[in-house]
Amino acid sequence: MEFLKALEHLIGWLNENRPNGPYHVQITKRYHRVLSQNSAYCFIAHEPISNRTVGIARVGDILRPASWSQPARHARGSIYRPEEWAKIFGEYGIKTRLDK
């Protein structure tokens, strides 16, 4: 699936299945920042990343926000696997631990 189509599908899913919407996207240098009520809800990597702050992220990886401008370390999932979205996205944001 193409990146922008997968991202559009994710935003539609969030708007239908999660409170605190509407969700929309803001493009930054390395990420697409998904916003909910002017808060960073998650980040989506739109280029491969390898650095100390994030670790390793592939295109389409979903990252939990550490702050408004920066994602937390380690990817939580991918926009290319919609069957995992219900486990990744909790009622109020991305779950910290995915095994719960």
Image (tube, grey):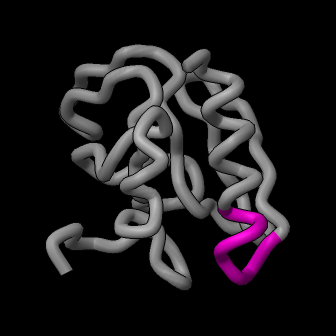
Q: For the point 20% across and 34% down, which residue is it?
A: 55
Q: For the point 36% across and 15% down, which residue is it?
A: 48
- Determine the image quadrant of residue 4: top right
Q: Please give the range of residues in magenta.
A: 14-21
Q: Residue 66 location in percent, x, y?
A: 40, 60
Q: Given the current orientation, which residue lies at the most extreme front position?
A: 83
Q: Given the current orientation, which residue lies at the most extreme left position?
A: 99
Left or right relative to 66: residue 34: right
Q: Residue 52 location in percent, x, y?
A: 19, 33
Q: Quadrant of the N terminus?
A: top right
Q: For the point 63% across and 47% down, which residue is it?
A: 10
Q: Residue 100 location in percent, x, y?
A: 19, 81
Question: Is 49 located above or below residue 60 in the figure?
Answer: above
Left or right relative to 1: residue 99: left
Q: Is residue 16 magenta?
A: yes
Front position in the image: 53 or 13: 13
Left or right relative to 58: residue 11: right
- Determine the image quadrant of residue 92: bottom right
Q: Residue 81 location in percent, x, y?
A: 41, 41
Q: Is residue 2 magenta?
A: no
Q: Given the current orientation, which residue lies at the most extreme right position?
A: 22
Front position in the image: 90 or 32: 90
The mark tally for this picture is 0
- Determine the image quadrant of residue 19: bottom right
